[in-house]
């Protein structure tokens, strides 16, 4: 069906374009108009300006004009237009975002370090929640595929995404633009650049603001409630973002130039349309009585005030995930309803960035460059829609009586973070002879990174009053108007041992709208690196480049609380709780005074409050390039990618530390232009061998605030082919096509531990008893990706120019876990835009639409092994808008 739709849309667009007959004005094409034509593209993927067609790397760039006319708002749009690159923000709108290049998907979604490194003007961005820089003026964005550690360092394991900001210009200029669109979309952007006092000092100032109510209706009965603080009232999937930026360039001397960049970005993103489904894991914690899953039946027990209660439930979901929860499991609302607690939010983050660069042209052939960067960042989230059924809630016992039960919505937020980092890079570029060039330098950085887990518990947001089993009122409709986390609840009702809500579902110091802060961990990272690169023109047509980086990364970790929220050296004495009649959860300890373990004391699971580890790596890359003519180039390369190891806040000593992971990528590519540059054809064939793969597994000792932990699972391989084609069919019609085929597989010996620790598979049916997943497709990767666009330019004799574009993206299904049991389906998204530019390039009008055919499917999902829970988000719904821009 999808292939039929693709054929239909291609035929429709081609037919429409070919019957149109424009009259083209013969005039000089301005830069803005040139951006709509086929032109030479300059990139800095190797930290120097080069033509895209001459660089022996697979790079996909986007200029500011291209992104603006196609209404790009973030990394999702860039990924949808790049073969071999995908990005999902999940329900948290980017707090747990996952960028994937060439199938090397991060196997642990909430890990601190991503497999794709993001940079802005050469400064490394530490976290997923820092990646949305869409409001800042960009000269271009570059997606560089394949390991880039040798040149970039800092975990460019599978590739890198470079944000290159627009610098001040001598020529005064600027713009003001406004966008209005569906569902209260409104954008305001303004920028000015030019000399300050003299042409030696140039400045640029910009501001951006955007707000949007969301792309999908919230069917919650209290969706229009107005909770204080950040929330997702009304529709869901919206945002409220803004940014300020200032940049200065100063010619210190004729040979020394300095550039200062100051950036501030704030994002408030609503939870994306999503739902949760759970099975045996959530049942064991007492969070959810129903069994949403459909395969691999298992047995478990739930602790209650009257002792353990046995039950049977499924441990996995098998098959295609649907866009709505009620299509999978019974709910209290309709089959196509989407219900989100309006008190939730997806991502709230603030990022500050300072860059300072000096370039000293010592001679015509030698340049010394220095780059300093400082970043400050904080982010938090509620982590999801508010439970499996936000209208019904979860049953949680308070106190020791089985009748003391309240219905609450639980929001599991992870990771929340505070980061500050400094970095310094010094580089010398020296063209020794006409044929030999060298680059050598050093890098140093320090990072302070604190992260924690939050668990919000609030009474169900519903109209009317709430009563417990004894008829006592425990809440009313005002619950919907109170922000989550307005009060921290102690570990027990009568004693403030630590600021957490509960240890287990059956023993909870409940307070209305309580917050549990657990797994509070701080990291200090210090990175030292030295790098060198040689470029040698062996002949006029054959060149060789070799690069290498030696890196020492020292990571220190400080554990503030364990997964139960108890600080180092603390304990909780349950004998102080009146009426308590049952034992404490796992993690109990011997009383240090009496030497007796009577089941009344819970001690901190932190054995060592701090730890440190040194990680050493050497990352080489070599490229052999042959350019027989100016229009054709062939290359072969081998590159090593490395991502540092780290620590888990785990109780089991064997799960405390995980080691580095690395890959070797071998690539053969060619870049070509034919028929007087009317056809551009770029191809790349690659194989990736991945070792020490870091992946998420269930912890050996668990609690309600426990996160999955990271282990080195084993090896994987990825073999693929990428192609990018741009062809001018007529003077007015340009077609671009990107294709990616990728086959990432786990190697034999990789075991997915939730298959072992949380349930037992039937190896004659669905999976091996020992969790072996060798031969399975890597989780969260698509084998096939297609992106194509058709641009039709019409220039009138009056000087006005009309440009229309239709583009579509297709990606095949993605499995949710290494077991390859559940998957999100293939999807096909269509976008369109109409741009009108006046003769003097002063006024621009852009009418755009996204997902214009309303593809309605599950878009992504990730799995929490601790709770045996799937968190599923759906495709972004249709949206439309009109941008009006005035250029100064």
Image: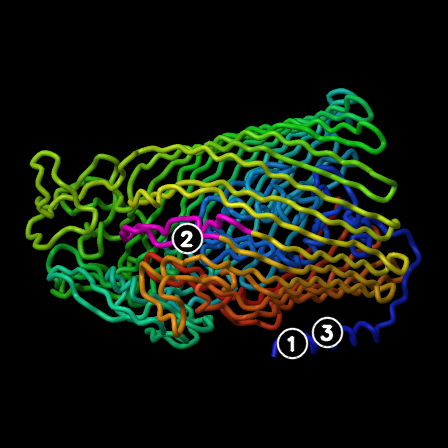
**Alpha carbon separation for disc pair 1 and 2:** 35 Å
The spot of residue 360 in percent (x, y) is 73, 24
1 or 2: tag closer to the N-terminus: 1
Question: Any magenta on residue 817?
Answer: no
Quarter of image, res 589: top left
Circle 1 is placed at which residue position?
A: 3
Q: Quadrant of the C terminus?
A: top right
In the picture, the disc for residue 10 is: 3
Circle 2 is placed at which residue position?
A: 696
Taking the image as shown, residue 477 lies to the left or right of residue 634, namely: left
The spot of residue 527 in percent (x, y) is 52, 31
Marks 1,2: beta carbons within 8 A: no
Q: Quadrant of the N terminus?
A: bottom right
**Residue 149 higher or lower than 855, as above or below:** above
Taking the image as shown, residue 125 lies to the left or right of residue 7, namely: left
**Alpha carbon separation for disc pair 1 and 3:** 11 Å
The residue lying furthest to the right in this view is 26
Q: Secondary structure at mark 2?
A: strand
Marks 1,3: beta carbons within 8 A: no
Tell which of 87 and 750 is nearer to you: 750
1 or 3: tag closer to the N-terminus: 1
Within-10-Å neighbours for mark 3: few <14, some 14–19, many 20+: some
Q: Nearer the viewer, mark 1 or mark 3?
A: 1
Q: Nearer the viewer, mark 2 or mark 3?
A: 2
Segment tinted magenta in the rendering: 690-714
Taking the image as shown, residue 596 lies to the left or right of residue 9, namely: left
Residue in view at x 34 percent, y 43 percent: 649
**Alpha carbon separation for disc pair 2 and 3:** 41 Å
Within-10-Å neighbours for mark 2: few <14, some 14–19, many 20+: many
């Amino acid at each position: 069906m999808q292939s039929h739709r693709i054929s239909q849309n291609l035929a429709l667009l081609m037919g429409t374009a070919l019957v149109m007959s424009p009259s083209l004005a013969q005039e000089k094409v301005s830069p803005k108009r040139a951006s709509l034509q086929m032109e030479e593209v300059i990139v800095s993927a190797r930290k120097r300006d080069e033509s895209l067609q001459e660089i022996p790397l697979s790079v996909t760039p986007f200029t500011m004009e291209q992104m603006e006319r196609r209404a790009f708002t973030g990394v999702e749009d860039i990924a949808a237009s790049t073969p071999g690159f995908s990005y999902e923000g999940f329900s948290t709108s980017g707090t747990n975002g996952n960028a994937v290049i060439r199938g090397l998907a991060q196997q642990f979604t909430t890990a601190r370090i991503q497999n794709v490194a993001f940079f802005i003007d050469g400064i490394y961005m530490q976290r997923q929640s820092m990646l949305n820089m869409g409001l800042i003026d960009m000269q271009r964005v570059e997606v560089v595929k394949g390991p880039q550690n040798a040149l970039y360092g800092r975990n460019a394991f599978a590739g890198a995404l470079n944000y290159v900001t627009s610098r001040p210009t001598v020529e005064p200029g600027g713009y003001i633009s406004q966008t209005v669109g569906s569902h209260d979309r409104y954008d305001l952007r303004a920028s000015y650049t030019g000399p300050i006092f003299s042409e030696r000092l140039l400045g640029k100032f910009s501001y951006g603001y955007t707000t949007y109510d969301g792309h999908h209706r919230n069917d919650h009965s209290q969706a229009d409630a107005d909770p204080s603080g950040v929330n997702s009232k009304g529709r869901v999937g919206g945002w409220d973002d803004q940014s300020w930026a200032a940049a200065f360039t100063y010619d210190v001397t004729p040979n020394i130039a300095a550039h200062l960049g100051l950036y501030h970005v704030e994002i408030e993103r609503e939870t994306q349309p999503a739902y949760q489904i759970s099975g045996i894991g959530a049942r064991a914690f007492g969070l959810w009585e129903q069994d949403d899953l459909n395969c691999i039946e298992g047995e478990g027990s739930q602790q209650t005030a009257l002792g353990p209660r046995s039950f049977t439930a499924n441990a996995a979901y098998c098959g295609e995930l649907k866009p709505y929860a009620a299509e999978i499991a019974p709910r209290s609302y309709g089959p196509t309803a989407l219900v989100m607690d309006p008190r939730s939010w997806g991502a709230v983050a603030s990022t500050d960035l300072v860059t300072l660069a000096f370039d000293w042209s010592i001679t015509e052939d030698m340049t010394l460059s220095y780059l300093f960067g400082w970043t400050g960042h904080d982010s938090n989230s509620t982590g999801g829609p508010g439970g499996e059924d936000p209208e019904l809630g979860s049953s949680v016992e308070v106190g020791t009586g089985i009748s003391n039960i309240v219905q609450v919505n639980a929001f599991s937020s992870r990771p929340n973070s505070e980061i500050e980092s400094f970095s310094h890079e010094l580089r010398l570029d020296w063209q020794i002879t006409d044929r030999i060039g060298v680059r050598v330098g050093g890098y140093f950085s320090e990072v302070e990174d604190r992260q924690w887990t939050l668990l919000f518990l609030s009474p169900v947001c519903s109209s009317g009053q709430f009563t417990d089993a004894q008829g006592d009122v425990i809440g009313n409709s005002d619950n919907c108007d109170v922000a989550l986390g307005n009060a921290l609840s102690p570990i027990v009702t009568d004693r403030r041992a630590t600021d957490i809500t509960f240890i287990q579902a059956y023993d909870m110091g409940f307070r209305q709208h309580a917050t549990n802060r657990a797994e509070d961990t701080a990291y200090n990272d210090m990175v030292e690196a030295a790098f060198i690169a040689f470029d040698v023109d062996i002949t006029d047509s054959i060149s060789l480049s070799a690069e290498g980086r030696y890196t020492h990364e020292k990571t220190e970790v400080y554990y503030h609380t364990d997964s139960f929220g108890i600080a180092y050296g603390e304990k909780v004495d349950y004998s102080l709780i009146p009426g308590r009649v049952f034992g404490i959860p796992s993690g109990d300890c011997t009383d240090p005074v009496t030497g007796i373990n009577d089941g009344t004391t819970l001690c901190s699971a932190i054995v060592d409050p701090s730890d440190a580890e040194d990680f050493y790596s050497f990352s080489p890359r070599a490229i052999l390039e042959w350019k027989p003519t100016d229009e054709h180039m062939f290359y072969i390369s081998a590159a090593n990618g490395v991502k540092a190891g780290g620590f888990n806040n785990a109780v089991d000593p064997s799960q405390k530390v995980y080691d580095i992971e690395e890959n070797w990528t071998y690539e053969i590519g060619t870049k070509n232009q034919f028929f007087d540059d009317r056809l551009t054809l770029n191809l790349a064939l690659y194989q990736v061998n991945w070792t020490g793969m870091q992946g998420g597994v269930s912890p050996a000792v668990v609690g309600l605030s426990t996160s999955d932990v990271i282990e080195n699972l084993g090896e994987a391989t990825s073999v693929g082919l990428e192609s990018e084609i741009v062809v001018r069919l007529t003077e007015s019609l340009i077609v671009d096509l990107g294709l990616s085929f990728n086959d990432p597989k786990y190697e034999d010996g990789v075991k997915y531990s939730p298959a072992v620790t949380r349930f037992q598979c039937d190896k004659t049916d669905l999976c091996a008893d020992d969790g072996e997943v060798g031969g399975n497709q890597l989780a969260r990767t698509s084998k096939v990706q297609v992106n194509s666009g058709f641009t039709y330019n019409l220039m009138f004799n009056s000087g006005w120019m009309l440009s229309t574009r239709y583009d579509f993206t297709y990606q095949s299904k993605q499995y949710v876990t290494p077991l390859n049991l559940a998957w999100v389906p293939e999807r096909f998204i269509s976008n369109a835009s109409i741009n009108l530019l006046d003769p003097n390039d002063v006024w621009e009008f852009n009418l755009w639409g996204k997902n214009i055919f309303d593809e309605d499917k599950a878009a992504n999902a990730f799995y929490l092994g601790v709770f045996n829970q799937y968190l599923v988000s759906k495709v972004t719904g249709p949206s439309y808008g009109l941008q009006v821009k005035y250029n100064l």
